[in-house]
Each structure stands twice: as C-alpha cells, then as structure tokens.
Image: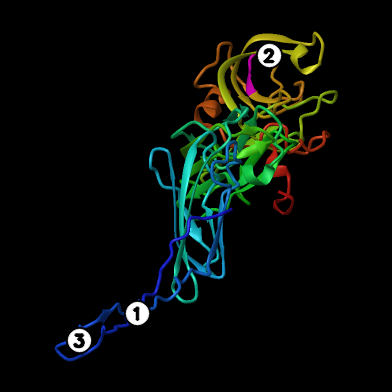
Amino acid sequence: MGGLLLMTAACGDDQGKDGEATGTAATATATTPATAPATAAPRTSAAVLDVTPKDGAQGVAPNALQVSVSHGRLTTVDVTDKNGRPVQGAITPDGTGWKPAAALTPGTAYTVNAQAVDADGLAAAATTAFTTLAPDKRVSTNDNIGDGQTYGVGMIVKVEFSTRIANKDAVAKGITFETDNGTEIKGHWFGDDRLDFRPAEYWKPGTKVTIHYRLKNVEVSPGVYGDVDKDEPFSIGRSQVSTADAATHQLTIVRDGKSTTVPATLGDEKHPSWGGTMVIMSKEKVTHMNSRTVGLGDEYDIPAAPHAMRLTGSGTYLHGNYWYKGDPFGKANTSHGCVSLKDVEGGGDSTVAGAFFNSSLIGDVVTVVHTKEKTVSPDNGLGGWNLPWANW
C-alpha cells in the first residue's frame, strides 16, 4: 500500500553580493540583481513501509494485521482501537516486521501509525485505518470447573464446544494453565468438539491452578469465533485414590497415604464393571437409576439410589446400595456394572457408602482391577488417565 511519507530536505546556505558599477559624476550608478542561491534537491527516505490491511479496508480477518518495512527498520508501531486502547505487539529482532501479540477483536475499528528509518536515518511513516469483520457466529464454550472450587488429584478439565472446531491449534493456544508449582498441563482432542487437559501424573495435593481463556478473537472455524475471555481459578485438595478389586470384592481407599479397605460389590458375570482408571465426575445425594437409560431394558428402576458418584459418561456409578437381599458386600459381584457400597434407604452418613461419599471430592480417582471387562475408553467420562502421556 502507499504510505504517508515524512520527508527531510537539506538546504544550501550560499551567499552572494550585488555587483557594482562606478562612473564619473556625469554617469549614473547602475545596480543589477544578484544571482539566486542554489538549493539542493530534497532527500527522501529509502525505507518503504507496508501495512496489511490496506487503508479503509472493511471485514478484515482479526489475524490479518502485519506491518513490514524494506530498506530500513521500524522504530515505532502504534495500533489503537476506536476508543484509543492500544494493541500489544512487538517489532521483530531484525526490525523489519511487527505483529500483534494476539488476534484483534472482531467488529472493531483500528488505526495504525508506523514509523521507520533508512540507513541514513531518514524517516518514513504510514497511517492506516481499517475495521475487522463482525463474526457470523460465536461458539459456546463450557467446562467442568467451578470458579474457586476444590477438586481431587485426578481431576481432568473437560472443555466442550457447541460446534466442531476446525482451527484446533489456535483454540488450544487460547486456553492456557497457570499453576503455583510449575505443573505442566497438556490438552488432548477427543473428536472435533472436546478438548481435555491434565498433567502427566496426578496433581500434587494443594496445587493452585488458574485457567486463562482467550478465545473471543480466535476464529475457531470459518466465520465462527470464540465466545469467552476469562480467568478461572481452582484448587487441588488432599490426595484420595481408591481401588475397587472385582476379585476380592473390596474397595481400598488411600487418603494422604493412609489406607482403608471396605467391602464392596461390583458388576456381575453378565455385566462386569469397566476396568481401568476413572474419576468422580459428579456427586448426587440421591439419583434415579433406570436400566432403560443404559440400554438394559427393564432390569431395574431405583427412584432414589443414595450417595451416587458418577464415574463414566456411559452410566457407571460408585453408589450406596440398600436393596440387595442378603449381604453380598465383600462376598460377591451382583451389580449391573456399578461399584456399590452398603447403605440404607435414603442414605445414611454413618454407613460405608455415606462415609465414602462425604469424604470424596469430584476429581478423586477410582480404579477398577481384576475385572473381565475391558479398560474404559479415555473419552468415557474423565477416563483420560488410561491414555499414556506420550499419546496425550
């Protein structure tokens, strides 16, 4: 594009005298004009600025802005929106380019003022005004984190989008994690609309975490932009990791290094429990459990199953059980795939199930071993711990 050039000129300072003619008293004195001083041609900077987009452009992509110079180096680049708010950015180390630190805000007017100098120090400048495009649509972003809440050491942050994401790299870069102990967090895509985050190993107890969402200016798919710029803090509590053994019918709970074992019953021969590592996704004092919701016909309908802690998206729970005749806990596997602990109707705080429920956090780990069923899929609930870190 053509830039507005600031030019410097060198001026000469030659001096001249009027010529004189002298004669006798009878002769008149004649005066002639002096010759005009010579003036040097103006010097123009060799630096050529180029600003993209062009001046007056409309519907500009939020990531299109860039400034460059040939035959010189940039000295300043000032970009402001219509309210005078500056846009952060940086000149490249070689001085020939500038880009904003992040994508611009959609549907906003901007002004660019750029200056550069050539090898002789002569200045050039360019001014451009343009407007970014207004998004046709914004995606809805939701995660499983409550602002300021405390979670177990197995917590996986699940981010779901209301539409498929085409620009996955840009979206992943727009979600960053800050921890007080330097824990590294990585994301993994499950399909085109779900992005889960976790560390390489279980979180260290007491870790303070903040998620930084910067998605409003990100084009997640053609014509579709993110909907959220926010910071979301949460904490990791004490460590609790439990193991349900389908062979011994026991649940072993290790809380901050102290181990306790309680009797349990798991999935029967026809409906074995999922194997592998699961994470408590939610807690409900009571919940309605109906076999039709998990494709098992009319096998059961329990209006108020107590102390229910969901482990998978497919319907596996660790819950209290009061309806079995006899006492299968610690003796046999009798459920339709859930891990069950002894309870009373309505749920009692003093029961095995009640005590476990009250001491558990969303994000606590429950691993099932010695089951005939295969390992739960990494995208079933918060099953991401079953995917090796190298593949995450």
- Mark 3 lies on a secondary structure that is loop
Left or right of 145 on screen, residue 20: left
Q: Nearer the viewer, mark 2 or mark 1?
A: 1
Tag 1: amino acid: Thr
- Mark 1 lies on a secondary structure that is loop
Spatial CA distance of label 3 from label 2 is 131 Å
382 lies above or below 12: above
Q: Which mark is residue 35?
A: 1
Query: Residue visible at 70% across and 14% down?
Result: 324
What span is colored magenta in the figure? 319-323
Tag 2: amino acid: Met
Q: Which mark is residue 289?
A: 2
Q: Residue furthest front?
A: 26
Q: Please, what is the dominant secondary structure of the magenta stretch? A: strand
Magenta segment: does it hold 134? no
Q: Measured from the top left, where is residue 59 in percent x and y?
A: 60, 36
